[in-house]
Image: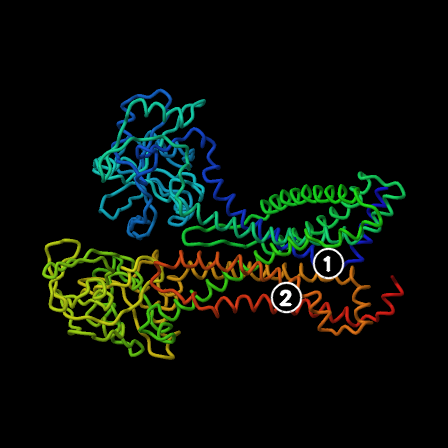
């Protein structure tokens, strides 16, 4: 019997080989896309799972009366206060300052020291015990007995010293403290909750007069953790802390402390990001799944006569179920093979990057996920097959025609249109928003000029004595047209509070500290007043006037309520530096840079490659060998500013393409089933004089109705989402233009019309006499 079921299943799949291939390809792509998206979610959910004692670690935080987390950290004295309570359930208690990048100088040999920009956290030796990190080199007793000890991670030691033993080497910190390397610890996993996606490279221990030792009351600059004895959980510690009524100081007063499980209360932004990724993957998978079940159910209901005959010759529901399930299982089996082949092709070397988040895909884990999802699809297929069997059991051979309306299939196809329109709209919105940013960001420069202006980082501390020498060398080169010195990048997001006491006005706004040639370099023109800039004066842009609603020229300006006052010399035209954020970002005050800064260098047109090579060569002469030069064009800085929009554009464009193809393949499969089922009707209509146009409208009107219904649902939702997202953006495209939305509808309508036309033209060529003869 098994051989019979397999033979019948293969025969039917081969009979409808076009729809079969469409269904397999669509489901394979959808399954892989969903697996790639959920891989990221699982990676996030696996935070700290590499720690064997994760369930015993509690993070102690400051909360409101409602239990909401108030700050990212705790004051340094909190750990000592808890330690003084001598709580029996605590095995180890530790505290660590935030993990930040600092400049440390490492002794390589007796006569050679190299600086490195490296992540550093101040803590104690209990930190590596709590987080279950092995000390690969060094001794805890000797480490605890000495002040100013530095511990290196395994990867940091490899980067700085190679295979050499660094124990005993001296290190100078930013604060000029001298540390001694006392040990090497095992690397922390990348997805740890202490410092998510940032490496923990250096731990400073027993720091004399350090941040932890000072124990400043209202500064919440560290995190506090407790490792509990076996058998105890964070909620047990939380009850004890609650009974003790323990509080901690922070910037706005004092508040209760609470013990949370490690990784609890993750940042809302990360939850939204991964929720968005999961939603996208789910929609693609759902679209492919709907296409698969649409083909399956349509194929089953097209064979009602066959099933009715089988019923009349004695086959029961169980036998019919096995027949249908065998066909569905074979389809899923071939889908699985194709999905695994695609995974093996693209997974090695596949990398997800979004700001600090860097994730490499593991083929083995992807295979496991795909297997789980195929099992889920198999269960769904079994449910579908059993439902069809129950319905078929209620009909007779003569009543089978009642099931020809394909309501379920049409509903599934309508949902596919909704999903396709969601992705297509998202891709169009992200694309137009990106284009708007490209045109308006750094709007005083042309596209060509952005490609020949280079940012060079020159604010390193170890360049203080050579900074002016480097500038003189650059200015003497004929390839360099001009140099603008700035405190931060043009796209910096520093916001300050500005007050004009004489006008009784104040506003928030951005700032730009630059050299005196800032207006000529940025092509800023005077709106009113002059563009002269000195240590006692500033310039403002047009948006500043809009906010204070008055002429500020010759008025005195105070910054952040400091006593120093600056005279406003003039007003310039606006210079857009941001895409998103508050409108205050577009308001800008320009001040004179005093001392060392970074540089924007404009190279002569046509000399971009030679100019960049020259900048790299000269900056390396002034940098230690351990520091790589940071050089990029203004165009690249513009792209980095738009990184969110670009990532969204790429994601939506890729998935819109996939989803549109799956939907169109679903339409093709559906129209193929319709034309096959209604061949006799088409033949009779042709005999009675129906034209190609009449036949085309006969089949196309259903799909146009489905598309229109989907459009009326999707477009209002996408408009509301776009309006809510972009309402506070400095730069936004005109999404209220009806032509924008009509263009999206026209694209998907045109593709649908082409697919239907191709199939109808083939059907129209069939001789009606041959159809009647076969019937």
**Residue 615 x %, y %:** 33, 69
Q: Quadrant of residue 80?
A: top left
Q: Secondary structure at mark 2?
A: helix
Outermost residue, front side: 688
The mark nearer the N terminus, 2 or 1, is: 1
**Residue 139 x %, y %:** 36, 32
Residues under labels 2 and 1: Cα distance?
16 Å
Mark sitting on residue 19: 1
Residue at image position (33%, 40%) is 203
Mark sitting on residue 752: 2
> Could you tell whether 191 is left or right of 514 in the image?
right
**Residue 666 x %, y %:** 67, 59
The quadrant of the image that shows the N terminus is: top right
Q: Quadrant of residue 616?
A: bottom left
- Coloration mode: rainbow
Residue at image position (65%, 51%) is 340
Q: Nearer the viewer, mark 2 or mark 1?
A: 2
Name the foreground residue: 33 vs 137: 33
Name the foreground residue: 442 vs 165: 442
**Residue 321 x %, y %:** 78, 42
Q: Quadrant of residue 641?
A: bottom left
């Amino acid at each position: 019997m098994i051989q019979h079921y397999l033979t019948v299943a293969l025969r039917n799949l081969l009979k409808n080989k076009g729809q079969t291939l469409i269904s397999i390809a669509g489901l394979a792509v959808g399954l892989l896309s969903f697996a790639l998206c959920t891989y990221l979610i699982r990676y996030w959910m696996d935070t700290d799972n590499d720690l064997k004692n994760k369930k015993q670690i509690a993070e102690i935080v400051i909360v409101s009366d409602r239990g909401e987390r108030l700050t990212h950290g705790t004051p340094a004295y909190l750990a000592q206060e808890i330690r003084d309570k001598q709580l029996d359930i605590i095995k180890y208690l530790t505290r660590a300052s935030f993990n930040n990048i600092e400049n440390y100088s490492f002794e390589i040999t007796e006569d050679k020291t190299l600086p490195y920009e490296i992540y550093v956290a101040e803590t104690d030796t209990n930190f590596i015990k709590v987080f279950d990190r092995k000390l690969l080199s060094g001794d805890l007793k000797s480490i605890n007995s000495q002040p100013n000890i530095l511990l290196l991670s395994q990867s940091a030691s490899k980067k700085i010293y190679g295979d050499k033993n660094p124990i005993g080497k001296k290190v100078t910190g930013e604060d000029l403290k001298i540390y001694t390397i006392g040990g090497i610890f095992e690397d922390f996993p990348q997805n740890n909750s202490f410092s998510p996606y940032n490496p923990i490279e250096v731990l400073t221990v027993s720091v004399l007069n350090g941040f932890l030792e000072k124990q400043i009351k209202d500064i919440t600059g560290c995190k506090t953790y407790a490792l509990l004895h076996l058998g105890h959980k964070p909620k047990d510690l939380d009850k004890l802390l609650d009974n003790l009524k323990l509080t901690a100081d922070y910037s706005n007063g004092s508040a209760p402390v609470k013990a949370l499980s490690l990784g609890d209360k993750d940042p809302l932004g990360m939850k939204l990001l991964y929720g968005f990724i999961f939603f996208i993957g789910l929609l693609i998978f759902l679209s492919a799944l709907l296409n698969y079940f649409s083909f399956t159910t349509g194929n089953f209901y097209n064979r009602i006569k066959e099933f009715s005959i089988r019923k009349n010759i004695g086959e029961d529901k169980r036998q019919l179920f096995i027949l249908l399930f065998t066909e569905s299982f074979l389809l899923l089996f071939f889908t699985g093979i194709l999905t695994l082949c695609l995974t093996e092709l693209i997974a090695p070397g596949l990398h997800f990057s979004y700001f600090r988040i860097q994730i490499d895909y593991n083929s083995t884990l992807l295979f496991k996920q795909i297997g789980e999802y195929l099992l889920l699809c198999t269960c769904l297929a079994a449910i579908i097959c059993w439902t069809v069997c129950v319905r078929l059991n209620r009909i007779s051979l003569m009543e089978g025609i009642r099931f020809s309306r394909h309501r379920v299939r049409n509903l599934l196809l309508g949902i596919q249109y909704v999903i396709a329109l969601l992705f297509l709209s998202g891709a169009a919105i992200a694309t137009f928003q990106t284009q708007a940013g490209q045109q308006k960001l750094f709007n005083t420069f042309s596209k060509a000029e952005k490609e020949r202006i280079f940012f060079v980082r020159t604010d390193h501390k170890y360049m203080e004595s050579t900074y002016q020498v480097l500038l003189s060398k650059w200015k003497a080169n004929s390839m360099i047209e001009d140099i603008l010195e700035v405190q931060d990048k043009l796209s910096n997001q520093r916001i300050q509070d500005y007050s004009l006491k004489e006008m009784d006005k104040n506003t928030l706004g951005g700032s730009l500290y630059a050299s005196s040639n800032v207006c000529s370099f940025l092509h800023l023109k005077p709106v009113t007043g002059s563009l002269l800039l000195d240590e006692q004066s500033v310039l403002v842009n047009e948006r500043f006037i809009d906010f204070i609603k008055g002429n500020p020229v010759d008025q005195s300006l105070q910054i952040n309520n400091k006593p120093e006052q600056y005279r406003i010399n003039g007003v310039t035209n606006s210079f857009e530096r941001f895409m998103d954020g508050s409108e205050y970002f577009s308001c800008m005050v320009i001040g004179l840079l005093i001392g060392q800064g970074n540089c924007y260098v404009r190279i002569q047109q046509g000399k971009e490659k030679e100019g960049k090579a020259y900048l790299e060569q000269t900056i390396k002469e002034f940098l230690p060998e351990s520091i790589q030069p940071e050089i990029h064009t203004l165009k690249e800085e513009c792209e980095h500013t738009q990184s969110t929009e670009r990532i969204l554009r790429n994601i939506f464009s890729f998935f819109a393409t996939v989803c549109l193809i799956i939907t169109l393949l679903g339409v093709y499969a559906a129209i193929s089933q319709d034309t096959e089922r209604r061949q006799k009707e088409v033949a009779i209509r042709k005999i009675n004089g129906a034209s190609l146009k009449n036949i085309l409208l006969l089949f196309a009107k259903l799909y146009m109705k489905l598309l229109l219904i989907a459009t009326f649902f999707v477009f209002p939702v996408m408009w509301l989402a776009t309006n809510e997202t972009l309402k506070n953006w400095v730069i936004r495209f005109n999404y209220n233009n009806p032509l924008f939305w009509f263009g999206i509808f026209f694209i998907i309508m045109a593709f649908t019309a082409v697919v239907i036309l191709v199939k109808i033209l083939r059907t129209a060529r069939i001789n009606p006499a041959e159809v009647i003869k076969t019937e």
